[in-house]
Image: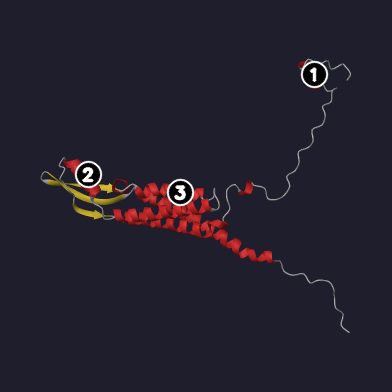
């Protein structure tokens, strides 16, 4: 006759199954921060570089002119700043607010990329500079050429967009900045009860005198 044990066999905890999900959340969090910060940095730096070059006719010769990204369009740099603010704000809000901020982050990257791409073929900035330089309002730029910096700026906007997509997809699992300071369910230690003051202590005698009491009088 076989002996059957009544002791229950311990089962593996289901909590271990959440370990891969936690690791995935950390990876998406790190990727979102890296992409957002790197994208904003690229946009801000590339916007200050020369985007377009050309020549304006002055008298019997030509005058070389150039325009940087801020001259062509200031939208990518402005949206990069908005994207940075949204990237930080993602960790300060939760729930529906986090979704809204993540969407703003993605739209900032999309707008920065599209505006930079449109500026890669823009000639208005150099035409305006030619008119100011020559004093002729109808002057235009000849031999117009564009550098690769508008496309670098657009690539930075794409990185911000990817950060926003990650925040929309995985942001609900990311922690908040105030989460570590909130209650974790454990009871807070109680403050030690204040003991009654000792009337024989010198500082208590002085306090009694300040209040106009007679410390030598028995209660």
Quadrant housing residue 217:
top right
N-terminal of the two: label 1 or label 2?
2
User: Which residue is at a point 77% across and 69% down the rendered structure image?
Assistant: 10
List x then y, in percent, for residue 104. Answer: 44, 52
Q: Mark 2 points at which residue?
A: 129
User: Which label number is shown at residue 84?
Assistant: 3
N-terminal of the two: label 3 or label 2?
3
How packed is label 3: few (under 14 Cα within 10 Å), some, or many (20 or more)?
A: many
How packed is label 1: few (under 14 Cα within 10 Å), some, or many (20 or more)?
A: some
Above or below, 102 against 215 in this view is below
Q: What quarter of the picture does the N terminus occupy?
A: bottom right
How packed is label 2: few (under 14 Cα within 10 Å), some, or many (20 or more)?
A: many
N-terminal of the two: label 1 or label 3?
3
Task: State the SS at label 2.
Answer: helix
Task: State the SS at label 1.
Answer: helix
Q: Mark 1 points at which residue?
A: 208
Side (left or right) of 31 relative to 219: left
Q: Which of marks 1 and 3 is in front?
A: 1
Side (left or right) of 131 relative to 189: left
Above or below, 32 against 134 in this view is below
Give how far apart the Cα atoms at labels 1 and 2 are.
82 Å
List x then y, in percent, for residue 22. Answer: 60, 61
User: Which residue is at a point 36% across and 54% down the rendered structure image?
Assistant: 153
Extreme-left residue of the structure:
60
Give how far apart the Cα atoms at labels 1 and 3 are.
59 Å
């Amino acid at each position: 006759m076989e002996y059957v044990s009544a002791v229950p066999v311990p089962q593996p905890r289901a909590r271990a199954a959440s370990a891969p999900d936690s690791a995935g959340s950390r990876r998406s969090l790190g990727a979102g921060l890296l992409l957002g910060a790197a994208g904003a940095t690229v946009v801000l730096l590339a916007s200050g570089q020369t985007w377009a070059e050309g020549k304006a006719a002055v008298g019997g010769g030509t005058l070389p002119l150039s325009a940087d990204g801020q001259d062509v369009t200031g939208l990518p740099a402005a949206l990069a700043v908005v994207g940075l603010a949204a990237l930080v704000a993602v960790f300060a809000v939760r729930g529906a607010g986090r979704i809204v901020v993540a969407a703003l982050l993605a739209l900032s990257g999309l707008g920065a990329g599209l505006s930079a791409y449109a500026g890669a073929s823009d000639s208005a900035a150099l035409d305006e500079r030619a008119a100011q330089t020559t004093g002729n309002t109808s002057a235009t730029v000849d031999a117009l050429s564009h550098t690769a910096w508008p496309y670098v700026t657009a690539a930075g906007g794409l990185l911000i967009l990817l950060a926003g997509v990650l925040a929309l997809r995985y942001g609900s699992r990311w922690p908040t900045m105030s989460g570590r300071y909130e209650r974790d369910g454990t009871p807070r230690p109680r403050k030690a009860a204040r003991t009654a003051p000792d009337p024989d202590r010198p500082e208590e005698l002085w306090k009694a005198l300040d209040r106009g009491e007679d410390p030598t009088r028995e209660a």
